[in-house]
Amino acid sequence: MKILLADDEVSIQKLISGLLEDEGHECVCVEDGTDALEAFENASFDLVILDVMMPRMDGFATCRELRTRGVTVPVIFLSAKGDIVDKGIGFAAGGDDYMTKPFDPRELLMHIEAHLRRAHMDVAPAKPEPKTLMLGRFVIDTAKHQVTKEGISIKLTPKEFKILLALARMPDTVLSKEQLIEDAWGAEFVGETQSITVFIKKLRNKIEDDPSDPRIIETVWGIGYRLVEGAC
């Protein structure tokens, strides 16, 4: 995949470009938002990483301009500011993810790969979704919004059902809190990730064999959750 990185710190450029190239991706580095927009005029990219604080044009303004121009690829913000207000601005500007500096390079790579997988699925030819998903002991009826475990019906709220369905559609794949919020609430609520923790707890209380030791819905710290198919 071809990834554009806009960051005026040379050390960050070297770290991220080396990380991506080791995974077989191509990374194009620029120093600010103005250069990022120019890069898009000359090439296409599969994902964009934007530092927030940059000379000439900051990351938020750059993302807004990219969205105005019709660019739909995933955008990940990097920033030394980690408060909820700045994150809200980032998501409102059209960003898909927000990571705070300093960050764990391995965690950044997991975020990148997750967004690339999802973007690839979005552009792949759509296949009719089966009305019934069967995962081990679970049967999920997407038409009736019903879930059974070993033949016993489980009563879920609409949001709990949507979260479970999102996880069940991609078993063993890590979904970020932002992705789950978007599926359950809509894109306009993506910045409110604290709510997903509450709903995951409620969902575990209803579907886990032992909610105090969850095995079906696994927490991937710092990223999100995944449904473990082998535990279903």
Image: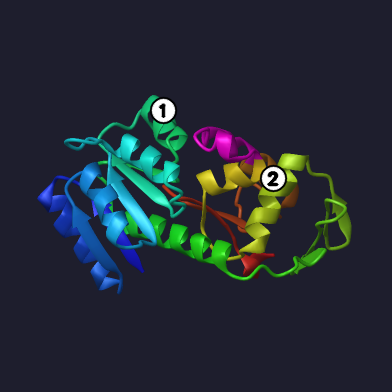
The kind of residue on which mark 2 rests is Leu
Chain part drawn in magenta: 185-199
Q: Is residue 184 above or below residue 228?
A: above
Q: Secondary structure at mark 1?
A: helix
Q: Earlier in the sequence, mark 2 or mark 1?
A: 1
Q: Quadrant of residue 65?
A: top left
Q: What residue is rendered at 75% in x and 68% in y?
A: 128
The kind of residue on which mark 1 rests is Ile
Q: Is residue 183 above or below residue 149?
A: above
Which residue is tagged 2? 203
Tell me the crowding category of disc 2: few under 14, some 14 to 19, or many 20 or more residues within 10 angstroms, Cα based: many
Residue found farthest to the top: 85
Q: Main secondary structure of the magenta part?
A: helix
Q: What residue is rendered at 35% in x and 62% in y?
A: 44
Q: Is residue 39 left or right of residue 12?
A: right
Q: Where, quadrant-wise, is the N terminus in this rendering?
A: bottom left
* Viewer-closest of 225 and 68: 68
Q: Is residue 187 magenta?
A: yes
Q: Is residue 180 above or below residue 133?
A: above
- Cα–Cα span, label 2 and label 1: 25 Å
